[in-house]
Amino acid sequence: MTVALRRTSLAHVALRTPDVGACAAFYTDVVGLCAAPADADGRVRLGWGSGHHAVELVPGPAGLDHVAFAVGDGGGARGVVERAGLDAAERGAALVVTDPDGNAVHLLDPVDRAGEHTADPGRRPVRVQHVTFSTAALEPMVEFYLRLGFRLTDRMGEVFAWMRSETEHHSVAVVQTGRSGGLDHYSFDLDGWADFKVWADRLTDLGVPVAWGPGRHGPGNNLFLFLDDPDGNHVELSAEMERFFDERAVYPTRTWEDGPGTVNLWGGQVPSWRKAGV
């Protein structure tokens, strides 16, 4: 029997990259993360200098290697897999399942998050927050994550679905782009609105274009600003995510208008990669 997740959050995002050094430099110099020395396989893990890492860089063709979730709900990672009736491979501390688009999802027991929420405003974000997958088949992806215990918060027609596993509006989303497998984007949290001005100025000083924003999403009601890493991965900076208190109230799934005004309530031009999803 599927049990709704309430205390499960994104632990890290692992990206394949043909140039680990250049990508690591971006995440240290621009995003402000701290890099650990490369391991024997050339992987570099980046985080806050203590606690679990947020980004893992893996040598290889550019793309998604895996995403990892820390399961704080009863039974931990193994409980999620058993309740969902899925086959899982063991890889170190992780149980690995594969979604319908072939994305590897690592399920971990709770991890050390000691370094998070110690942000120097404008220097680094406070934590990694959510992932959005690109797909050519929305419904199988939604059904898979609901089977794991995620709850459907909002939809935008047959194009977008947002799912939560804790109090925040979404930790996983899926968008219909016509391309199955891999990320549409992933997100870091900033401390609040004041950080966005600092980050926009900082990116300008570093010569890193703002790819989209600042703006405010309809679903989630969160502030956002996007930039791209050296491999073209879309990285969102976000704050003020809407919260849901499922132990105290029952929330129906909402359906939003399919259009650019939903993905940015403030209006303005929508980038070409997002237009594919609206």
Image: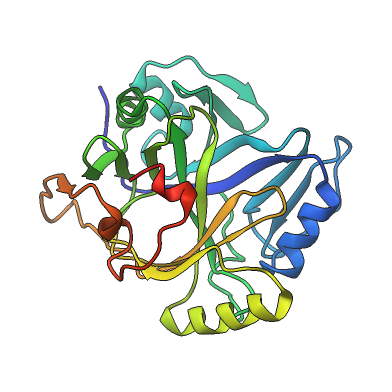
Q: Residue at x 26, y 51 (%)?
A: 259
Residue 186 spot, x, y in % from top left: 51, 51
Q: Residue at x 65, y 42 (%)?
A: 14
Q: Residue at x 59, y 45 (%)?
A: 13
User: Does residue 123 sit above or below 149 in this rendering?
Assistant: below
Front in this rendered view, residue 202 or 91: 202
User: Does residue 69 sit above or below 121 in this rendering?
Assistant: above
Residue 108 spot, x, y in % from top left: 54, 38
Q: Which colour assignment does the render follow?
A: rainbow
User: Does residue 113 sit above or below 209 in this rendering?
Assistant: above
Residue 219 showing in the rendered view: no
Front in this rendered view, residue 170 or 198: 198
Q: Is residue 75 left or right of residue 44?
A: left
Q: Residue at x 56, y 52 (%)?
A: 234
Q: Residue furthest right?
A: 40
Residue 249 spot, x, y in % from top left: 11, 54
Q: Quadrant of the N terminus?
A: top left
User: Does residue 138 sit above or below 150 in this rendering?
Assistant: above
Q: Quadrant of residue 148?
A: top left
Front in this rendered view, residue 187 or 107: 187
Residue 35 showing in the rendered view: yes
